[in-house]
Image (tube, rainbow, N blue to C red):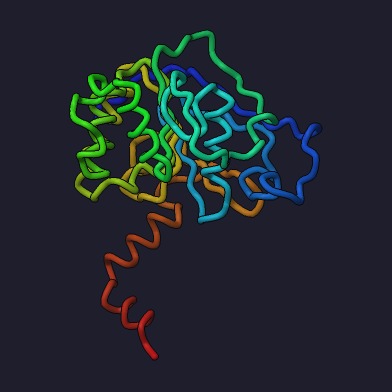
Amino acid sequence: MKAFEARHYLVEVALKRAEVPAFDRYPFAMPAVKHLRRIALHPAVTFVVGENGSGKSTLLEAIAVAWGFNPEGGSKNFNFATRASHSELHRYLTLVRSPRRAHDGFFLRAESYFNVATAVENYGALGSYGGRPLHEQSHGESFFALLQNRFGGDGLYILDEPEAALSPTRQLAFLARLHELVGRDSQFLIATHSPIIMAYPNALILAITPRGLKRIAYAETEHYRVSRAFLLRHEAMLRELMKE
């Protein structure tokens, strides 16, 4: 796979720790936030990985809102709201931006993508999403329509668990499209559980640990190790898991 010389839009994220009211309450008590000081992002692709409840989605959401995206997803032009569920974390973040201006961008949340699809139809913007109503497609089809038609490059894309809509084969296709967009001066920040997606070469992987975010190699992630162990010894592991 050809390597591209990517350039930042979002260089660094820092937590205003002195302004945090208390680190024993949500969202500041979450492992992704409690020990956060500053994180430097990769100019092309940064993955944030961790267990459910570790705070990766909360962190990505806060970064997206601080950047100017709608909390439920979409671009900066989306201003709909169905339920105010985002945390106050974005108020305590400082984003270090590069001098380069992003001409495109999108925030995708798997859990609120239905609301984004509704907003696209209400805005009469189907032409930018392939022309076919997103609600008339499967979740995976509509997400791929978004990826292929709406993401144009030269921008910042923040994706929260994109694999929720994708089969393994589609995840491989996602990697190909991701690489194409990186070649068009795109920067990605992605929270994922998928060992397929996080295999993208030369990406920065930040794992959420009890002591905060830690840079980790792909083969050292729990996602890779557990998936590999299961696929190599699935019968023995199933017997162990299901024994009385």
211 lies above or below 66: below
Question: Where's residue 5, x and y in %?
Answer: 37, 18
Quadrant containing the N terminus is top left
Q: Residue at x 49, y 42 (%)?
A: 48
Furthest-front residue in view? 122
Left or right of residue 179, residue 218 in this image: right
Q: Which is more toward the observer, 93 or 79?
A: 79
Q: Is residue 97 above or below residue 69?
A: above
Name the residue at 19% across, 24% down: 131
Judged left or right of residue 208, residue 171 is left
Residue 177, image x and y in percent? Answer: 25, 30
- Percent of width and height locating residue 38: 65, 32
> Which residue is at the front of the view, 203 or 52?
52
Q: How many marks?
A: 0
User: Residue visible at 25% across and 23% down?
Assistant: 126
Quarter of the figure that contains the C terminus: bottom left
Name which residue lies at 53% across and 45% down: 56
Q: Quick one: which residue is furthest to the bottom in this view?
A: 244
Residue 93 occupies which quadrant of the picture?
A: top right
Height in image: 138 above or below 4? below
Residue 14 percent location from the top left of the image = 66, 29
